[in-house]
Image (tube, rainbow, N blue to C red):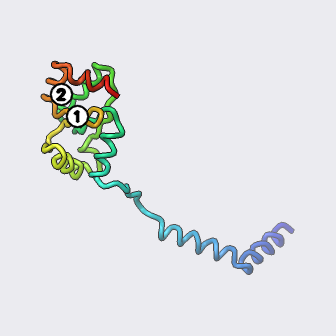
Amino acid sequence: MKTKTMEFRSNNIRKSGILPLGITLLLMMMMFAPTKVVGSMSPSAFFENLIYSNRIVIFSKTQCPYCVVAKSVFNRLKEQPYVVELDHHEDGGRIQEVLFDRVGRRTVPQVFVNGQHIGGADDLDVAVKNGALQGLLCTC
């Protein structure tokens, strides 16, 4: 009895066209679905958005000893920088080119506080010693 009911329902579904339509829609969704989500921001827009949307930004590379020092400066000051590890970022090379266009340097780290370019590790050290960094951190 159950078999006849199931057969009746599946025949009705096939006859009504619901099943083929559903399969067709599913196949179309799979064919035209994006395989990868692509960011809508250019590296330049990403850079600008980042430095003006975050209090502290460090452009870094994971194995760079100077970058480790720069990050530790903010750690000691109990500050939380937004760190962009260029060697792990999909657009790292292009972002590094944007850095060169904006500040004239490709080297890392490059530190920004409240949208203002501080510089690299040596510049950050000078800013800490002369109090300029602390002054920038106090202004919001």
Q: Distance between the residues labelled 1 and 2?
A: 8 Å
- Residue at the image position 32 percent from the left and 35 percent from the top: 82
Circles 1 and 2: CB distance less than 8 Å? yes
Residue 113 percent location from the top left of the image: 27, 32
Depth check: 55 or 76 in front? Answer: 55
Q: Which mark is residue 111?
A: 1
Question: Which comes sooner in the sequence, label 1 or label 2?
Answer: 1
Residue 44 percent location from the top left of the image: 27, 51
In the depicted structure, whether residue 116 falls above or below residue 88: above
- Residue at the image position 21 percent from the left and 49 percent from the top: 98
Amino acid under label 2?
Leu
The residue most toward the front is 139
Q: Which mark is residue 77?
A: none
The residue most toward the right is 1
Depth check: 60 or 98 in front? Answer: 98
In the depicted structure, whether residue 72 falls above or below residue 118: above
> Is 118 placed left or right of 33 in the picture?
left
Amino acid under label 1?
Val
Depth check: 80 or 102 in front? Answer: 102
Depth check: 87 or 108 in front? Answer: 108
- Residue at the image position 59 percent from the left and 72 percent from the top: 25
What SS does tag 1 mark? strand
What SS does tag 2 mark? helix
- Label 2 Cα crowd, 10 Å radius (few <14 / some 14-19 / many 20+): many
- Residue 38: quadrant of the picture: bottom left
In the depicted structure, whether residue 39 falls above or below residue 15: above
In the depicted structure, whether residue 94 falls above or below residue 16: above
- Residue 63: quadrant of the picture: top left
Q: Name the residue under label 2.
A: 124
> Is 59 placed left or right of 33 in the picture?
left
